[in-house]
Image (cartoon, grey):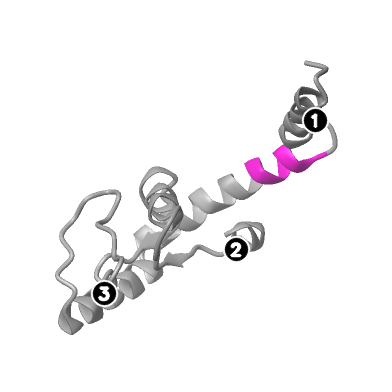
Amino acid sequence: MFESIAAGVPNILWPFDADQPIHAAYMAEVLDCSWELLQTRLGEGAQPPARGGKVEGTAEAVVAEFKQVLSEIKGEVGKRKRTNLMALRHQTFEALKEGGEVQKEVRACLKLAAGEA
């Protein structure tokens, strides 16, 4: 996801397993800068959506969901998500700067690992 955040391109997320469903829900619902596909969750190991919602999983439901997302991309929802993504992009690059939060946290972690904290 970092590459798309850095490029300022919203994601259409199709989470499969492990941490992907919760990250997809967070990006789509909390940060409001991506879309999470729900109707594609089929087959062995499929997890229910972390944000709730009904998964019909039919071909018709998948097509309808894709059409909805593509429609939203072109409209006000897409505009809002792109704006939110650009704010996230800015926050991310600020955190990655010399002396930024990322560097501070990595240094703190290294001190802790070295027994210096």
The C terminus, quarter of image:
top right
- Left or right of 61: which side holds 94? right
**Given this view, does label 2 or label 1 mark the residue nearer the observer?**
1
Judged from the image, the secondary structure of the residue bearing numbered disc 1 is: helix
Are the residues at dot 3 and dot 1 in contact (C-beta closer than 8 Å)? no
Q: Which of marks 2 and 3 is nearer the N terminus?
A: 2
Residue for badge 2: 4
As drawn, 8 above or below 50: below
As drawn, 42 above or below 100: below
Question: Residue 11, image x and y in percent?
Answer: 48, 64
Q: Does the magenta stretch include residue 26?
A: no
Name the chief secondary structure element in magenta: helix
Disc 1: CA contacts within 10 A as few (<14), some (14-19) or many (>=20):
few
Name the foreground residue: 111 vs 13: 111
Badge 3 amino acid: Gly
Residue 110's mark? 1
Judged from the image, the secondary structure of the residue bearing numbered disc 3 is: loop
Q: Earlier in the sequence, mark 2 or mark 1?
A: 2
Q: Does the magenta stretch include residue 93?
A: yes
- Left or right of 1: which side holds 25? left
Image quadrant assignment for residue 94: top right
Judged from the image, the secondary structure of the residue bearing numbered disc 2 is: helix
As drawn, 76 above or below 112: below
Name the foreground residue: 90 vs 47: 47
Name the foreground residue: 6 vs 57: 57
The N terminus, quarter of image:
bottom right
Question: Residue 3, image x and y in percent?
Answer: 65, 62
Residue for badge 3: 43
Task: Tell me which residue sits at (83%, 25%) in the image.
Answer: 114
The residues colored magenta run: 91-97
Task: Tell me which residue sits at (83%, 17%) in the image.
Answer: 116
